[in-house]
Image (tube, helix red, strand yellow):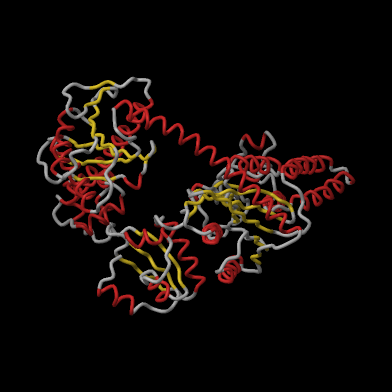
Amino acid sequence: MRLTDDLSERLRTLPTGPGIYLFKDADGRVLYIGKAKNLRSRVRSYFQSSRNLEPKTLRMIGRAVDFDLIGTANEVESLILEANLVKEHKPRYNIRLKDDKQFPYVKVTTSEPFPRVLVVRKLEKDGNTYFGPYTSVTKMRKTLQMLTRVFQIRTCNLVIPAPEGKTHKVCLDYHIKRCAGPCEDLQSQDDYAEGVTGVLMALTGKVDELIEQLTVKMQAAAADMRFEDARRYKVQIDGLRSISQKQSTEVQEKIDRDVISLAREGKLAVCVVLQIRNGTLIGRQDFQLESDVDDSDEAIVETFLTQYYNHQPNLPRELFIPRDLESLEVLQLWLREMKGGAIDVIRPQRGEKVKVVDLAATNARMLLDELLIQKRVATERTSKMVTSLQADLGLTMAPRRIACFDISNTGETDAVGACVVFENGKPKKSEYRKFKIKGVAGQDDFKMMREVIGRYFYRIRTEERDPPDLVVVDGGKGQLSSALSELTSLGFPDQPVIGLAKRLEEIFVPGQSDAQSISKSSPGLTLLKQLRDEAHRFAITYNRKVRSKRTITSELDAIPGIGPAKRTALLKAFGSVSKIKVASVEEIAAVPGITAKLAETIKATL
């Protein structure tokens, strides 16, 4: 970021309180989000020549053209806000959890009289009880299936008790002894609540305690000759013991504890959470993080803690970490506020506690080794596709970065272009680009391709970025010729480029009038097919979006008295023009801002 007079003035007037700062590039994309105890001191440090900045930070500052600030009341609020904004914006230069939105939670609907056990993807403050997130979905579902079967938890979506005037009938689960029929009042709420309590205790790791309680109940029922009840308790005990056997060895202290460990190599980082509940190791959660080789272990651990526990419904009493952290006091204060009670963040130094941390470290290293093997196998497979394509096309260098262009239009309207980029044989969606055709009248695919190629490479030239190793245009000699002309005029005469014919195994190359063939068995041809299919999908999706927006806008805007505000209100109320068409005049008039007379006009026009 160039230190202009305006920027110097902004740096002089920065606030001294805590908050968040966001560095942005020329397109307004967020590059990096950081927190600070003193915003003025932290932000100004990025522009001090004497400061020894890491290479990653220098790259970020080199791309940044602006920054924003968000003040907070204290450091804890800064910590929370940073975690939420990083998850929302996914900045290029921040460490962040990879694909954390995919991890499910277990939701026990304890706000209902007869709770259910559900698998959900979103954590909400709705009065229910949540567990997770779970990274091993298969294990989690098997455990839930066993628990709901053993404790006869209903799997239906009925509202129980039934609303006034309605009745329910038992389903198949009742007849095969997987539900006791609370929908028909065949099971009391207190009796059902016993099963829910069993599920909650099992999910919080209190399996042994639960087995002891059920054993006492089983023996009492047998002594009173309530053999049916005794058998039910026996089935529950056997099911819980199967869970207990799968859980690892006991820890000496009967305490709830999470043990965090980190393993990393290059840009690949893995964090493991060993979950100890009531002294028993009940599970292991594994997470990959997107980081940079310049990031310190401490920064990765701190980022993981804030992003993981910001969406963790059940905090332990203790948290073991593998590194000393500068922000330990703030983290601990934040976690205590989240828990609403005591929680200690500790880095063990000796004794049995270190052995638990070593166990987590062993798990993290094993997981990292597995991922490295998978990555190497995938790289070898990808390299074969790239090197094969190099040989097929006779290129002087391997096309590791390929840009593929496609045009999509509906007759003479809604013409758009699309560019998809593959790196080392895999899509790089952050480099995808969409183009609304602006300078071509009518239907002329050649000129449209020239416009899209021109706009793409003009930006490469002005931003002084490296061009792709290979350009692929979807089309024959005409599209290839248009692309070559535009590339030459922009100063890229040596850019490798090919045209894909309708028959995939045939390609057009510069300087040859006839199509060239590629063997159907070539891995390079497979890569070209993936490229064209992805470019076609991306272009059509954008074309449909543009066409849909134009159709909606033109139909409603053609009605006298309808402006942008009323159009938005109508679409918000009905969802689509087709639903407005079938609505009555009274229903249309009920929309805020729509008078009865205007509603009649809308109905008549549509």
Q: Quadrant of the C terminus?
A: top left
Quarter assignment of residue 405: top left
Tell me where residue 128 appears, x and y as whole percent.
Answer: 58, 57
Residue 14 position (above or below residue 428): below
Q: How many marks?
A: 0
Query: Toward the viewer: 283 or 376?
Result: 376
What residue is shown at x 26% (from left), y 44% (from top)?
467
Tell me where residue 563 appears, x and y as whole percent.
Answer: 18, 57
Tell me where residue 351 appears, x and y as whole percent.
Answer: 76, 60
Horizontal placement of 77 versus 605: left or right? Answer: right
Q: Quadrant of the N terminus?
A: bottom left
Query: Toward the viewer: 7 or 392?
Result: 392
Whether residue 192 appears in this view of the structure is no
What residue is shown at x 32% (from left), y 46% (from top)?
431
Horizontal placement of 157 versus 284: left or right? Answer: left
Quarter assignment of residue 355: bottom right
Tell me where residue 445 appears, x and y as whole percent.
Answer: 15, 34
Horizontal placement of 414 versus 39: left or right? Answer: left
Query: Residue placed farthest to the right in the image?
Result: 223
What residue is shown at x 13% (from left), y 54% (from top)?
560
What residue is shown at x 50% (from left), y 34% (from top)?
377
Query: Toward the viewer: 323 or 140?
Result: 323
Query: Toward the viewer: 152 or 542?
Result: 542
Whether residue 22 appears in this view of the structure is yes
Residue 313 position (above or below residue 515): below
